[in-house]
C-alpha cells in the first residue's frame, strides 16, 4: 500500500509544481515572472493538445487565450524591467527562444488539427509572432518599443 501513497504524493507535487498564470503574476521578480509566464504558455499548449484529442474545442479556445495572455504577460514583465536587451540579454534572449519554440509547436499543433478547427489558433499565433518579433528587434537594436 505504501508505494501507491508515495506515487500519489509525487503526482500531487507534480501538479502543484506546474506553472500557472496566478503564480506568475504574483512573482515580484520581473524576469522570473516572465519565465513563469512562458512556462505556463508551454503547459497550456500541451493541455490544449490533450483536450483537443477529446474533441473539446471550447477548452482549446480557453487554453489558446491563456497562452496569448501568458506571452503578453512575459513581454510586459520584461519591458517593466526597463533594461536594455542588448546590455542585459539573458532574459530577453530566453523569451525570444521560448516564443520561437512556442510558435513552432503552435504551427505543428495547428497542422495536426482538422481543417475546420485550425482558425482556433490563428489569433494566438499572430500575437506570439508579434511578441517574438519585438523581442528579436529589441535584442538587435536595443530598448524594446
Image (cartoon, rainbow, N blue to C red):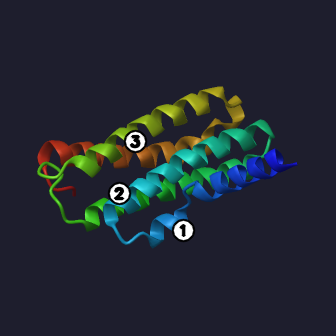
Q: Nearer the viewer, residue 126 or 78?
A: 78
Q: Nearer the viewer, residue 59 or 37?
A: 37
Sort mark 2 into few (<14), some (14-19) or many (20+) by Cα contacts within 10 Å: many
Label 1, label 3: how many angstroms apart (C-alpha)? 20 Å
Q: Residue at x 46, y 57 (%)?
A: 37
Percent across and percent down for residue 100 are 39, 37
Instruction: Place residue 51 in its image quadrant.
Output: top right
Percent across and percent down for residue 88 are 16, 52
Q: Identify the disc placed on residue 22.
A: 1
Q: Which residue is mark 2?
A: 75
Residue 49 relative to residue 29: left or right: right
* Foreground label between 3 and 2: 3
Label 3, label 2: how many angstroms apart (C-alpha)? 12 Å
Q: Residue at x 45, y 56 (%)?
A: 36
Sort mark 1 into few (<14), some (14-19) or many (20+) by Cα contacts within 10 Å: few
Instruction: Answer above or below: position of 81 versus 53.
Output: below
Amino acid at each position: 500500500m505504501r508505494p501507491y501513497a508515495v506515487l500519489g504524493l509525487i503526482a500531487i507535487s507534480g501538479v502543484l509544481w506546474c506553472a500557472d498564470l496566478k503564480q506568475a503574476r504574483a512573482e515580484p521578480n520581473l524576469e522570473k515572472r516572465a519565465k513563469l509566464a512562458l512556462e505556463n504558455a508551454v503547459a497550456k499548449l500541451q493541455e490544449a493538445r490533450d483536450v483537443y484529442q477529446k474533441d473539446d474545442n471550447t477548452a482549446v479556445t480557453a487554453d489558446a487565450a491563456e497562452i496569448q495572455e501568458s506571452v503578453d504577460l512575459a513581454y510586459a514583465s520584461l519591458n517593466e524591467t526597463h533594461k536594455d536587451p542588448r546590455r542585459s540579454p539573458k532574459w530577453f534572449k530566453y523569451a525570444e527562444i521560448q516564443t520561437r519554440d512556442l510558435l513552432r509547436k503552435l504551427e505543428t499543433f495547428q497542422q495536426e488539427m482538422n481543417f475546420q478547427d485550425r482558425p482556433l489558433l490563428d489569433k494566438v499565433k499572430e500575437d506570439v509572432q508579434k511578441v517574438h518579433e519585438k523581442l528579436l528587434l529589441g535584442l538587435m537594436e536595443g530598448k524594446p518599443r
